[in-house]
Amino acid sequence: MISLTSTAAGTFGRDRELAALRKAVSGAADGFGGCTIVTGSAGIGKSHLMRAATHCGQARGVAVAARAAFELDRAAPLITLASALQQLRPAEPAIGWLREDDDAQYRTLERLGAALEDYAAQRPLVIAIDDAQWMDELSALAVAELVPALASSPVRWLFAHRPAPSGTPGQQLIERLVRDGHEQITLGTLDDEAVRRLCAHVVGADVDNTVLALAGGCDGNPLQVEQLVRTLHLTGQLVVADGIGTVVGEELPSSFITIVDQMLHGLSGDTQELLRAASVFGRPFGIEGVAELLDVRPATLLTQVKEATAAGVLVDNGDELEFVHDLVRLAVYGTLSGAVSTLMHRQAAVIARAEGRPPVEVAEHLLKTGRSGRREAVTILHEAALEVAPAAPSTAADLIERALGMIGEHDRERVPLVADAVGLLASAGRLERAQDLGETALRSGLDPRTEAMLKLGLAEAFKHAGHNGTAVQYADQGLAVAGAPESVRAKLHAIRAHARFYHRDLPGADADGEAATAAGLAAGEYAASVFGLTGRSLVAQAQGRLDDAFGHAEHATGIADKVRGDAAHRHPRIWLGDAQAALDRFDEAEETYARGRRESERLGTAWSTPLWHYYHAALLTARGKLDDAAAEAEAGVAVALNLAAYALAVPLLGQLTRLAVLQGDLPQAQAHLAHMHRRMAAGISCAPEDMYWPEGVLQEAVAGPEAALTVLSGVVDALPERPVLIAQDPTSAPALVHIAVRADDLPRARTVVAAARALAARNTGILSLAAAADHAEGVLTGDPWLLRGAVERFRRTPRRLALAGALEDAALNSADEQQGRAWAAEAIAIVTDCRAERARRRLEFSLGGPKAPTERPVFRPGSPLRQLTPAEQNVALQVADGLTNRQVASALHLSRHTVDSHLRKIFTKLDLRGRVELATLVSQDREIP
């Protein structure tokens, strides 16, 4: 009898790959984080290498959280990552809350990131996920956020995947990680020598050419080679004589299916029955579940389990059993007859429901029981899709599509399914499919409520995707439906208010916002009232009625705070903070944004995150904190792309374009603008100020004022009715006048001055608007007293870059040389401190002003740390003092994403791998006071 050996102790033909994984894991032990991806076909040895890597980590004292993903994971949000972390060894009580049923999924991600950062500060960590192609959507989203967020911590991520199937959330994540430059290890087939060594290891003796010839038919796939050798042993077709293994017999296996089939026949009949029953589950299973499926007592299966594990078909993982590889399970499952399969799946559905398994698992079993289980499966899939939609929109869309595919075109239950499907498909970015499905349903004839709801779903879908013109059309159609409920009409008015605003119909948007507010309050649809009021706030600000903008946003916030529920999920503080900033109430706006963000995290409303980044970046820009503003906007783009919220990425990319120009990085500005144009080419629209203003600023820098005015002419011509650009950014008024004058277009320069004067007159008491009007007119006329007045007014506001601009023009037009030089020096000091490099270079060139005084250097001469910006230096000092990213964010009054962005830039500039190296460098190079 041959004593077969487990391959767990041996790795053959993978020395280079194993060395790379051990290096990666050892890096975590030494304080460095990162991500490694192992790619290869099924059975090629990925799982074996992952186990070897995690064993290496444990030997180095690294905590390990490891799990394989399963196909059924895809319908259970966060199950892949949460289950892996629950396997953390040694266990960590701080993440025990992951077991709780919490529907605020984005809050869960924030909390999870904080827990992992705190944990890694005490002990290095390896998180290993095998078969990552099956990862659920929320886990994939979490990983996409956490990998860069924890890059400075000693957290090493290991992912193994096979290239098929494509398009799953897990595969999309892997593709993104590879694009981002993370280490990838690709496994090929074993060479002949590795195959020989593997065969000899399994047999426990050397093997001859008869074994190697058969093994050669496995194309260097280690799983198939091992299963072949084990099957030959079980069937008595491999014998050892004089220390050499050789093959005997005539009916030798010729394919993997044949290998597994012969392997089964080498086992007892009872063990074959156990394996066929277990293959139905499609996941790890317990003895009790198989016993219930076979209608026997669990104790009677112990002998069969022992035989199956000894044969290497099953693996005992402690609490559960699983097949050695899913390919083996599928081959065993293929031996079930149709009638037996139907019966077993029917019973497996009962077992899964009793065990509290995810609803989709129950539905999967029911779908395989024939027509009798199909109706119930459709209901389960529909309910599951609605349940997972907030956290996993793509998964929800897949589930609802599957349910639709099982129900007839004329089935009376199809209509409510379609109504939900439209919204779910649109949320997943499948607009064309949502529109086709919705239009087909509308042509079939619907009752008024269903028709209005369907058109509301289409309007919301196209609005959130940035297709505002189409959203207006569907809202029009929905409001035209006679007999539509008042609550639905309120929502339609609210959606149309925002869509009309971005479609540049300000009177219509305001009318819809007013109608939504009234109808929502009357029908108890408070979320529609809140959304309608925020639409009115946008319109009021665009028209220059800043007190009204604040009043509408404050009213919306009051309703949301009082009734909570869906109204709170509309986050009116986004627009309240924007209105406060326009009124120069920066500290109040800062607090509003901070409170709103905390509430967003508590409610788990991921959609709002890019908006918080956008508006906070605008506030930081106005304060002159350009580095922090850029980091905030970059984080917003990353989150928007993670969420597939491409419409929200567009204005953020516009911000980044303008910030890069201010910082003197024109190539980076051009890259951001190109990215914005690519997104808009898909039909996304946004406010003209978000689109044309950054492009005009860039054109002025690279091509001159004529090219800039070509881009900005529409914005300038609209200023009398739509002065929102000046209201949000008072520096735009003098900048536009400069461009128009240099382009020899005095009429447009006068249009800007008149609009600025009218805006200031309409909003008396707002110093920045009065200053902007003086500044703009002073640039046009060269009047030094107007420019002096602009300087004095801007001094009394928190807008530092606006003050610097006024100082620059006042210096240029001053008849008092000494005063002019003083103003120039002050302007240079401000723009230097703000990191507005383009303005600094212009000032030093045109005014010949003195170099700005610098603070005492933080780091010794020659230190590479001196190449960091002041904002980056502040972050580096805090990290070196042992603070986590969230603690740094709190200390510096930044968002966590902003700190993450600063750290990534620090590591890139200094070629560092982690916090330990940064702390060491800071300690070495820090100046002692």
Image (tube, grey):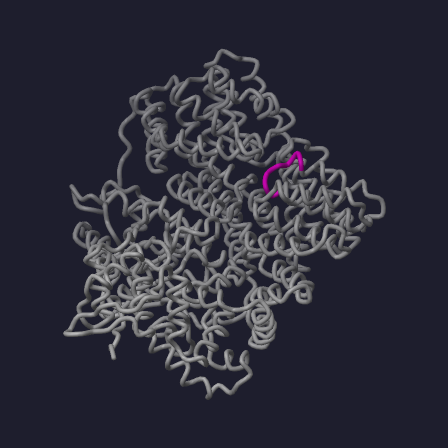
791 in relation to 112, above or below: above
Q: Is residue 17 magenta?
A: no
Outermost residue to the right: 483
Horizontal arrangement in the rendering, residue 228 relative to residue 722 (left or right):
left
Residue at the spot x=66%, y=45% of the render? 460
Q: Which residues are magenta?
A: 464-470
Considering depth in this image, is 96 or 827 the residue closer to the camera? 96
Q: Answer yes or no: is residue 121 visible.
A: no
Horizontal arrangement in the rendering, residue 871 relative to residue 711 (left or right):
left
Residue 418 on image: x %, y %? 70, 51
Horizontal arrangement in the rendering, residue 563 relative to residue 161 (left or right):
right
Residue 691 on image: x %, y %? 52, 30
Residue at the spot x=42%, y=85% of the render? 302
Q: Answer yes or no: is residue 846 visible.
A: yes
Horizontal arrangement in the rendering, residue 728 relative to residue 455 (left or right):
left
Tag count in the figure?
Answer: 0
315 in relation to 128, above or below: below
Outermost residue to the top: 744
Residue 671 on image: x %, y %? 40, 32
Considering depth in this image, is 315 or 34 the residue closer to the camera? 315
Considering depth in this image, is 114 or 223 the residue closer to the camera? 223
Residue 509 on image: x %, y %? 70, 37
User: Looking at the rendering, in which quadrant would you find the N terminus?
Assistant: bottom left
